[in-house]
Amino acid sequence: MVKKLILCDCGGSQNVDRAAIGSACDATCSRVHTALCTAELGAAAELLRQEGEVVIACGQEQVTFTELAAELEIDAPGFVDLRDRAGWSEQGADATPKMAALAAEALLPAPITPSADVISEGVCFIAGPGEVAFDLAAQLSDSLVVTVLVTDDARPLSRAYDVVRGRMRQVSGALGGFELRLDGVQHVEPGGRGGFGWTAPRDGAVSQCDIIIDLTGDIPMVQAPHKREGYLRADPRDPLAVAWLAFEAAQLIGTFEQPLYVRLEESLCAHSRAEQVGCSNCLDICPTGAITPAGDHVAIDPMICAGCGACAALCPSTAITYEDPPVSFLLARMQVLARTFRQAGGHAPRLLVHDAHGAEMIRLAARFGRGLPANMIPLELGVVSGFGHAEMLAGLAHGFSRVDVLLAPTTERDALTCELALAEALAGPTRLGLIDESDPDALSDLLYAQEKLDPLPDPVLPLGNRRQIARLAAQALNPGGPTMPLPEGAPYGAIAVDTEACTLCLSCVSLCPSGALIDNPDLPQLNFQEDACLQCGLCRTICPENAITLVPQLDLSDAALSQRVLHEEEPFACIECGALFGVKSTIERIMEKLAGTHPMFASSEQARMIQMCDDCRVKAQFHSEDNPFAAAPKPRVTTTDDYFTKRKDH
């Protein structure tokens, strides 16, 4: 499909090199317009009617061009903001390579995020003091099905909505699927003169609703209340906030699209084995409580998940992968930005990863300040909290001289802090950073003052899952394949085995979720493949001799991809058939402790069985006097003579 880029210099306020941009991003470019959104709107209409994929180089007037496309009954075009992110800059004269890079990225076909339909029928649950809750319920009762949980002694005067008293014990779910558990529930008794009465309290009530309005002014009923769809909350003493909730609740009726932000591959999860807990990274970091234990793996409620991506960034086994967008598309965007920038004549590009808040800061810095440096390429994501160490390293491997993540006031920061420390251990502390700045001018000053660094001379293209991406990028950044020490809790590493304490019981092998620990069916041997180790700690937890220690590191040599022996011993030869079995030192130690002293091994014959293989031990027991396999003697076969003998006797 033909890709067409419609250019405009916004009233001559920026320099737009049509030929250079078109050549670098491999697209057909229109002539450079000056007032495309006003005086030249007719020309824009003609360009939109032409066949092919159209991208308009304007971020400010998206509404104008979208409405124009609707009037023409054609698909809405794509958009790329070249002005605020490149043209309006203190170094705007040198912005052509960045413009080309941003245009090329905008022309990439974006994958569709999987989603599920959420149906809300307008069943609303309001909790709070009667004075406020009853007024709000009266406003909403015409459009919603309302139930009020009154938290004080107020009694309703209207039967236009249901009213109960009680205590909220638990809330689960999200928009269209909340489940409530209440204790001490009392229903209204509508009969009789005077105020309504209440029934006797009962515990264990369960109810469902689509929307919850929390006016209790108390601790929120759910984790991360601002991220839970369908959960609305306000201070009951703030009438404006309560009135706004009425407007919001009225909009929550119908069918909504819930993105399925993450995907879980249960077989890869290293959460638990044999009731021993290993990795709990995602459980510890999830701000909404969408992730819960489910046996050997975890479970993710997609309706509660807010899509921060922190779980995917911290998952050591790649059991959780982010889908909005997938990591492969994110890497493709970074590669196109870096490659096109170089092809257009740019040198030493820097990457600034940001969200919608950061985009607004960039626009303000461009309109009223210095804007971004000419080699600072912005990359906007829906959320930045899932931009982990693999993505940071991949950015450097693609040829960016530095990668910074611009934080917003609402950004979940715990995962980013951990991931930055891990990435810096592999790439050095000067090429990566988190920027926590809310002033656009201060942001520009900080970026202009950054140290000038040279990028990787030979950029590479890391592919695969997050573990593979991190390894390939780290190898490119650290030629020669050294072993890099990592901070505690890193998802890469080796294990150290105390060979004096290890008995080769191989409990660790049976629980290892990734197959990093391997036994040898022919010899008493413990093998290890470092590349597969997740550092989940299950082997250390299960070891009865406390012989295992985790060693966080990343071995970049090929040796990490093959098995090596951690511990081995001489096998014992069966005293009957000579077959090799067990561990010689273990059997000799058992003989010393049990033979002749333990009641079950009082005789030498019984003690000898310890030194036999499985087959010989069964044979020896079968032929022993107290054979445990022996059954009652078979009855003698009755013959004809027996019948004749009985008849003679009678």
Image (cartoon, rainbow, N blue to C red):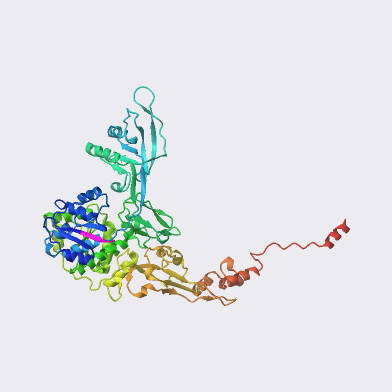
Answer yes or no: is residue 376 visible.
Answer: no
Numbered-mark total: 0
Answer yes or no: is residue 92 visible.
Answer: yes
Quarter of the view holding residue 390:
bottom left
Quarter of the view holding residue 102:
bottom left
Quadrant into which the N terminus falls: bottom left
Quadrant into which the C terminus falls: bottom right
Q: Position of residue 579 (x, y in %)?
A: 56, 76
* 575 on left or right of 129: right
In the displayed structure, 223 sits above or below 431; it is above
Residue at 24% across / 47% down in the picture?
A: 71
Quarter of the view holding residue 125:
top left
Decide which of 515, 49 is in the foreground and name it.
Answer: 49
Span of residues in magenta = 1-5
Decide which of 369, 72 is in the foreground and name it.
Answer: 72
In the displayed structure, 169 sits above or below 365; it is above
Residue 251 drawn in magenta: no
Q: Position of residue 457 (x, y in %)?
A: 22, 73
Q: Position of residue 352 (x, y in %)?
A: 21, 61
Decide which of 454, 112 is in the foreground and name it.
Answer: 112
Residue at 35% across / 29% down in the picture?
A: 159
Residue 3 drawn in magenta: yes
Identify the main secondary structure in magenta.
Answer: strand
Q: Position of residue 90 (x, y in %)?
A: 11, 61
